[in-house]
Image (cartoon, rainbow, N blue to C red):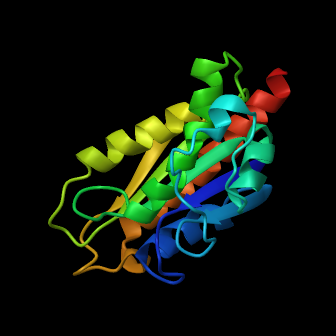
Amino acid sequence: MKTLVLNGSPHRKGDTAALLSELCKNLDGSIDVFSAYHDQIQPCDDCRQCWKKATCRLDDKMQELYQKINEYDNVIIASPLYFSELSDSLISMCSRFQYFWISRFFKEKELVNKLKNGVLIIVGAGDGTTVNAEKTAEIIFRHLKTTCIGQIFSLNTSKLAAKNDLVALKKAEDLAVRLNQLYLEESLGE
């Protein structure tokens, strides 16, 4: 089983990392993490090269994801909540999925073929709502042909760090087990 993590947090040991770590330690298989803050993935600048050629002109780690997108069985989106939205760096990184959209709608060529399962992780200090972030994540999942099987929220981190949020940690463990089960069921069904 292969899992893609789209991490929107700047903190390697913060609240998002705590829940992501709990989920990942219970997942089978390999995990590739794409960090919106640490991998220096540029946002789409609408140069429109992908309209003419089957390539993106921006040469960064996203090229690796383009090549491997159909190898993944799972997609995890993890982000702090900023002004009731996914982190701006995560949204900027995910703007590069425009490459898939252009191919599908202008060239009628589907680059993302494999169906995947997903999980959404959101952490926040407590004065925002997850509605907008959930809608944005839903769009990202849809472009990656991913069905979100569950969400993990720790939304009061100003008072209770995610690493101490027993409900969220248990949900992370449970969803990892569910992803493992789904992979096994799908593998046996083939």
Judge whether 80 appears above or below 117 on screen. Answer: below
| Residue at the image position 55 percent from the left and 33 percent from the top | 143
Q: Which residue is drawn at 29% across and 68% down?
A: 124
Residue 163 pos. (x, y %): 43, 78
Examine the rendered structure and indicate whether residue 43 appears above or below residue 52: below
**Nearest to the observer: residue 45 or residue 60:** 45
Q: Looking at the image, which residue is at 51% across and 74% down? A: 17
The answer to whether 128 is drawn above or below residue 147 in the figure is below
Q: In this orientation, does residue 115 appear?
A: no
Residue furthest toward the left? 127
x, y percent for residue 101: 57, 30
Name, please, the residue furthest toward the top.
108
- Front-lying residue, 151 or 132: 132
Image position of 161 (left or right of 90): left
Looking at the image, can residue 154 be seen? Answer: yes
Q: For this rendering, which residue is in front, 161 or 7?
A: 7
Q: The C terminus lies in which quarter of the figure?
A: top right
Q: In which quarter of the image is residue 146?
A: top right
Q: Quadrant of residue 74?
A: top right
Q: Which of 84 and 18 is in front in this view?
A: 84
Drawn side of residue 58 relative to residue 77, left or right? right
Q: Residue at 52% of width from left, 38% of height from top? A: 141
Count the labels in the image.
Answer: 0
Residue 152, image x, y percentages:
41, 55
Q: Which x, y percent locates residue 156?
A: 24, 71
